[in-house]
Amino acid sequence: MTKKIAVFASGNGTNCENIIQYFRNNGGAEVALVVSSSKSAFVLQRAERYGVPSAVITKQQFENEQALVLQTVAECEYIVLAGFLLRIPDYLIERFPNRIINIHPSLLPKFGGKGMWGHHVHEAVKEAKEAETGITIHYVSSEIDKGGHIAQFRVAIDENDSVEDIEKKVHDLEKEHFPRVLGKLFSESDMTEYERYCREQAVIQEEEFDEERCFPEMPEGQFVRGH
């Protein structure tokens, strides 16, 4: 069965467009709705280009109009955050338990938490003289960047890399891996057991789990234990 997902994005929307394209080419899910917190966000133009319905929900509406927000996403089974800058309210997390997925531009738990988004993350990575960085795909919880991890992908950093170089390396990881991880997650044939396991436990505990069987063709990525 094709899963309907809503993509939340606040800015340019490159990850959103990659996700739309991936599922149109591969099936298994469809982006049924794009939600932005700003009416001027370019992601809305990308959604219109692909014929995907869109909605603008402001910070004030997320905070004060719960019924409106829930009605807007009522027909969706998952929410994917692709560069969404607002904090997800608890009522939405409760409505979509372990069904809201975020991508963070670092190897969490490093460089996560309040204020750690976009270039702020890459600047912090550069300042800390890290030898590597990467992306973390994780479930959303009530604590910022503390939800159970689904997968991480890493890339080496050269000491001569600028903040812009680091940002490009991370964007390349996002483009290559984010849609494919979502595809595996939404695939009933590949992920039924894992999806049920995460719903029940929210994070990956210490029990053995057969990663290869669940992600048989996922290169370089790895499941990581929940924090």
Image: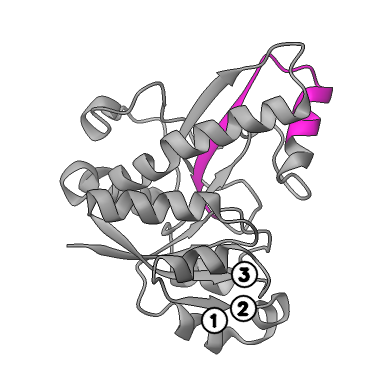
Q: Secondary structure at mark 1?
A: helix
Q: Nearer the viewer, residue 15 or 184?
A: 15
Q: Quadrant of the N terminus?
A: bottom left
Residue at position x 61%, y 78% in the image: 57
Left or right of 149 on screen, residue 144: right
Circle 2 sits on which residue? 57
Location of residue 222 in the rendering, given as x and y in whole percent from the top left corner = 41, 26
Q: Nearer the viewer, residue 121 or 196?
A: 121
Task: Name the mark nearer the viewer: 3 or 1.
Answer: 1
Q: Is residue 107 visible?
A: no
Circle 3 sits on which residue? 89
Task: For marks 3 and 2, give the CA distance.
Answer: 13 Å
Q: Nearer the viewer, residue 11 or 102?
A: 11
Circles 3, 1 touching at the beta carbon (< 8 Å): yes
Location of residue 123 in the rendering, given as x and y in whole percent from the top left corner = 80, 32
Task: Name the mark nearer the viewer: 3 or 2.
Answer: 2
Residue at position x 39%, y 49% in the image: 201
Q: Which residues are magenta?
A: 122-140
Q: Amino acid at mark 2?
A: Ile
User: N-terminal of the two: label 3 or label 2?
Assistant: 2
Circles 2, 1 touching at the beta carbon (< 8 Å): yes
Task: For marks 2 and 1, give the CA distance.
Answer: 7 Å
Task: For marks 3 and 1, give the CA distance.
Answer: 10 Å
10 Å neighbourhood of mark 1: few (<14), some, or many (≥20)? Answer: some
User: N-terminal of the two: label 2 or label 1?
Assistant: 2
Q: Secondary structure at mark 3?
A: loop
Q: Quadrant of the C terminus?
A: top right
**Residue 124 in magenta stretch:** yes
Circle 1 sits on which residue? 69
Q: Secondary structure at mark 2?
A: loop
